[in-house]
Image (cartoon, helix red, strand yellow):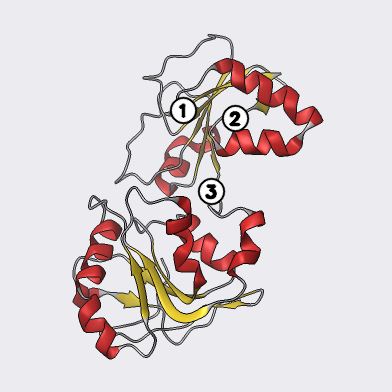
Amino acid sequence: MLAHIHQNLKHSDALSVLATHFGEADAKLQEALAHCGVLAVRLCSQAEIWLDVDLQHPPISAEAIKVLVVQEPPDVKSLSLEGFDLVLTWQDEHLKQLGRRAELFVPATPWLLPAEWDQFAIKKLALGFLRGSKCRTAGHQLRHKIWEEQRHLEHSMQVPLNFMEGGGVSREQRNMQFFSSFVLVIENSRHKNYFSEKLLDALVLPCMLWLLHTCRTMSQVSFVSDFSLRWPACPVHSSVLGVHKYWRIF
């Protein structure tokens, strides 16, 4: 049975129906539609799925199972949990609060497609970093502070900096950071179970990761130090920027 999906992206419901039928004949076409936000989910019972939106988007059927999928951290988006039969969430507070009505679900996936991976096989010695334009969360603000310090960092680092401004950039521009041997990863928020495509993209390529947890001031920046997390062909290395450091990833 085809589930109805509520999400912030707007498109004709007919496209989801087409995506389901296309998937039986052409899986690649269904995948391409999914990357455009046209999602099709088949379940064994009638259900409606809310992707990071709550029941302010009213249900279509009173009989359908109502499922909420939580994606963003609470300091980015606060959702009402009322009225849902099942909540798929990574937030520890939800899991404790809802008991059996909640299941642990981490929605993080890479932004990069497998077809794009090979182009980043040859890398240059540099530290890649994409700043972004948002300033809402601690991670957003820390990216801007790092950006402001880049002139000072250029003189103290042992590798060239490949810093780029985000916000409205093309996919190709956003991916330029992955031509660098090292990539600086700063998550938007620091929560248990939370990570995003920022970490996963650097892992799958692979790049050497410099991970920062978010904090209020540059003097409190925490780098991975004296610790090596081994993924296949992708070590996580410590970094030295002349600031206080101790081991902590998230």
Earlier sequence position, callout 2 versus callout 3? 2
- Depth check, front residue: 86 or 194: 194
Residues under labels 1 and 3: Cα distance?
A: 17 Å
Residues under labels 2 and 3: Cα distance?
A: 18 Å
Q: From the viewer's perspective, is residue 98 above or below residue 85?
A: below
Element type at mark 1: loop
Which mark, by number, is residue 73?
none
Q: Amino acid at mark 1?
A: Gln
Query: Which image quadrant: the N terminus?
Result: top right
The residue that label 3 is drawn on is 106
Q: Amino acid at mark 3?
A: Val
Q: Is residue 195 visible?
A: no
Q: Amino acid at mark 2?
A: Leu
Element type at mark 2: loop
Foreground label between 1 and 3? 1
Earlier sequence position, callout 2 versus callout 1? 1
The residue that label 1 is drawn on is 7
**Which residue is at a point 81% across and 29% down the rendered structure image?**
25
The residue that label 2 is drawn on is 39
Task: Tell me where residue 243 appears, x and y as whole percent.
Answer: 25, 84
